[in-house]
Amino acid sequence: MPRGCKPQGDQALSNAERQARYRARHQTTAATAVSRQRPIDRRSRPQRWREAVDMLLALQADYADWLAALPDSLQGGATAEALEAIVDLDLTSLADIDPPRGYGRD
């Protein structure tokens, strides 16, 4: 029963040639590998909360500007209704919330 692959040339590779080929093959695959881990977020939960609320308030202001600049032909449409719903949300109550720090760090 035959063992392994047939040699590509006249004779089989030496151990050093086989090892060099193995290292070259794995070096190219290691260089092309992509890290799939997300970067670690080092911000605290209260800090992330404040930044998210600030982003929501900024987006709401942008949508208010968009609604104000909407042409008259689109004032009664679905776009205007969606923009009005976003602008009418009371997000200031979210800004007043101070989330707990937790684990005895209050």
Image: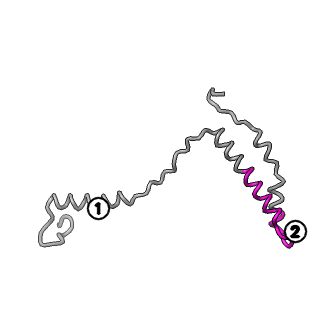
Label 2 Cα crowd, 10 Å radius (few <14 / some 14-19 / many 20+): few
Instruction: List the residue tagged with mark 1.
Output: 25
Q: In which quarter of the image is residue 3?
A: bottom left
* Image quadrant in which the C terminus is located: top right
The answer to whether residue 8 is magenta is no
> Mark 1 or 2 closer to N-term?
1
Residue 33 x %, y %: 40, 58
User: In the visual, does 73 lie left or right of 59?
Assistant: right
Which residue is labeled 2 in the image? 76
Name which residue type carries label 1.
Answer: Arg
Identify which residue, 68 or 89, lies in the foreground. 68
Query: What's the CA distance linking mark 1 and mark 2?
Result: 63 Å
Image quadrant of residue 51? top right
- The one of 75 and 7 positioned closer to us in this rendering: 75
Left-right relation of 105 to 7? right
Relative image position of residue 27 (x, y in whole percent): 30, 58
Q: In this view, does 66 lie above or below 42?
A: below
Residue at 82% over, 67% down:
70
Q: Which amino acid does label 2 sit on?
A: Gly
**Which element carries disc 1, helix, strand or loop?**
helix
Q: Circle 2 — which element?
A: loop
Q: In percent of the image, x 77 and y 59: which residue is there?
A: 63
